[in-house]
């Protein structure tokens, strides 16, 4: 009897006070040794209607010629953002409309008599992103006269941009324009080109022919830019690095300004975005509290998940999404839109495990009181 008693006591103690085991990725996602607590992952090749995607807000607004800083105003229209999911997800790069799968952002041809160019923009609904690594698979337009952009934004003096000008395309090369907008941009009348936080990087391929991954890592003291995981440039002018929370924006526009977007385009111009992934810290106290609650022990071998690099140009099926991994939930307590309603268990495997431990401990305790 006494050995049984001792054994039961050990088992009960093991359940109640044993080492805490973390669920996968509960303590965040790491790059180098930097940890980010939150993620957004949008795979635009999945079957979906972007209007229903709760992670993104399609924009509808209009600015006249003056505010637009060009010979034409801009009409931003949600209808200019169109979902084109792949025919056979994970296998075919072809979308249901025959063109490469992804989210299509259009700049429309100017109709006779129009003073505003019809353009496209999609913003993340989350506006609490503060430091992180942000990536997008993009195939730019071949049509001269537009500016495509993948950027982080708070306001006109707090902005980190990667911009694609179709006028810079050649049959064998292209350029990306890297910009940090700051008070300096404002002082220079909205023109960042003469500021120290503007860089043009030339790429050895035409970016309208295929998808490439454009990425920026934003840390308190620097912003590093990458294309297909290859480092391109750092901007380290610390007084111009944003230190506030903001959102991610995809846009495709033109205002006819020959010094920047050029245009308007002679035919409808389309930029396709196959995915956006962001691993970031949240400025929201509630999300910081969620992190503290779910991250019980950072030392667990799976508690922190390293963020993989994109290997070469991002083809459909080769892009890694934590939120799509089979087996255990690798995006526990994150807010990724999946097209399916979230199960009521909400906080995932950790809650399940805690529940079982509690049930077992109670059962054991009552069993022990019976036998003892
Ligand atoms: C992000 O938040 C985590 C958890 O609080 C922290 O350890 C990390 O240093 C933060 N990263 C940055 C770049 O501030
Ligand atoms: C997408 O959803 C919106 C709003 O729910 C709807 O108006 C639109 O017709 C849908 N588009 C397609 C292609 O189903
Ligand atoms: C997609 O393909 C990859 C590689 O073949 C595979 O590891 C992954 O499980 C597939 N995902 C889905 C959702 O089918
Ligand atoms: C932009 O945001 C920063 C940080 O909150 C603030 O200091 C600045 O005044 C804002 N600038 C504009 C033009 O709104
Ligand atoms: C785009 O149009 C501008 C203005 O008409 C012209 O200067 C430029 O060479 C064109 N670029 C390409 C790639 O055709
Ligand atoms: C990761 O390391 C690379 C190479 O040193 C650097 O360019 C990048 O800024 C770092 N990113 C983060 C988020 O630490
Ligand atoms: C994260 O977990 C907290 C605590 O369990 C819960 O209140 C919150 O709703 C969860 N958030 C998400 C997005 O699952």
Image (cartoon, rainbow, N blue to C red):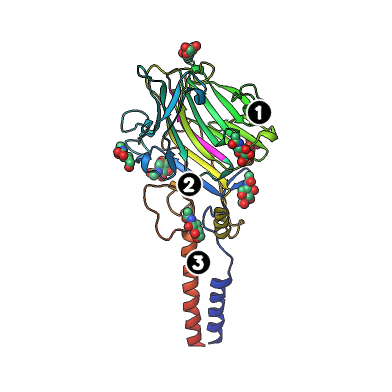
Q: Quadrant of residue 291?
A: bottom right
Residue 17 position (above or below residue 35): below
Query: Residue at image x 43%, y 20%?
Result: 142
Which contiguous range is marked in magenta? 133-143
Secondary structure of the residue carrying tag 2 is helix
Lower position in the chain sequence, tag 1 or tag 3: 1
Query: On the image, which quarter does residue 99 sit in?
Result: top left
Residue at image position (40%, 47%) is: 338
Note whether 126 is above or below 254 in the view shown: below
Q: Observer-nearest residue: 38 or 11?
A: 38
Q: For the residue labelled by badge 1, is the local secondary structure a helix, a strand or a loop?
A: helix
Judge left or right: residue 229 versus residue 314. right
Circles 3 and 2 in contact, beta carbons < 8 Å:
no
Q: Is residue 142 magenta?
A: yes
Q: Which residue is under mark 1?
A: 184
Which comes before the other along the chain, label 3 or label 2?
2
- Mark 1 or 3: in front is 1
The structure residue drawn at horizontal position 46% and vertical position 78%, both measured from the top left corner, is 363
The residue that mark 3 highlights is 354
> Residue 326's x, y, as percent?
42, 50
> Callout 3: helix, strand or loop?
helix
Q: Position of residue 264 (x, y in %)?
A: 43, 18
What number is the disc on residue 333? none
Spatial distance from mark 3 to mark 2, Cα to Cα?
A: 23 Å
Front residue of 176 and 173: 176
- The residue that mark 2 highlights is 322
Q: Magenta region's main secondary structure?
A: strand
The nearer-to-camera label among 2 and 1 is: 1
């Amino acid at each position: 009897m006494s050995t049984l008693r001792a054994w039961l006591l050990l088992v009960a103690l093991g359940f109640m006070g044993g080492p805490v085991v973390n669920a996968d990725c509960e303590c965040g996602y790491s790059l180098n040794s930097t940890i980010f607590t939150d993620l957004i992952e949008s795979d635009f090749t999945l079957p979906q209607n972007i209007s229903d995607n709760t992670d993104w807000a399609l924009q509808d607004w209009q600015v006249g010629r003056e505010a637009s800083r060009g010979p034409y105003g801009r009409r931003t229209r949600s209808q200019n953002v169109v979902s084109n999911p792949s025919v056979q997800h994970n296998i075919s790069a072809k979308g249901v409309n025959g063109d490469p799968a992804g989210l299509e952002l259009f700049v429309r041809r100017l109709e006779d008599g129009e003073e505003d160019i019809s353009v496209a923009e999609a913003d993340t609904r989350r506006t609490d992103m503060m430091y992180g690594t942000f990536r997008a698979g993009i195939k730019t337009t071949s049509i001269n006269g537009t500016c495509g952009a993948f950027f982080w934004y708070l306001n006109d003096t707090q902005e980190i941009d990667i911009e694609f000008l179709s006028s810079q395309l050649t049959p064998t090369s292209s350029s990306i324009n890297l910009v940090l907008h700051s008070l300096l941009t404002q002082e220079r009348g909205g023109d960042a080109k003469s500021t120290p936080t503007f860089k043009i990087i030339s790429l050895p391929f035409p970016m309208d022919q295929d998808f490439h991954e454009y990425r920026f890592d934003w840390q308190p003291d620097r912003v590093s830019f990458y294309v297909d995981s290859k480092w391109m440039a750092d901007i380290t002018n610390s007084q111009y690095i944003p230190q506030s929370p903001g959102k991610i924006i995809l846009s495709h526009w033109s205002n006819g300004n020959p010094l920047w977007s050029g245009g308007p385009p002679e035919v409808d111009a389309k930029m396709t975005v196959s995915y956006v992934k962001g691993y970031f810290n949240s400025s929201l106290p509630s999300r910081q509290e969620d992190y503290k609650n779910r991250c019980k022990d950072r030392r667990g071998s799976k508690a922190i998940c390293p963020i993989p690099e994109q290997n070469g140009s991002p083809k459909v099926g080769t892009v890694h999404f934590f939120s799509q991994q089979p087996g255990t939930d690798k995006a526990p307590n994150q807010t990724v839109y999946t097209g399916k309603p979230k199960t009521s268990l909400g906080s995932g495997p950790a809650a399940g495990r805690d529940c079982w431990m509690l049930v077992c401990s109670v059962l054991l305790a009552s069993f022990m009181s019976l036998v003892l």
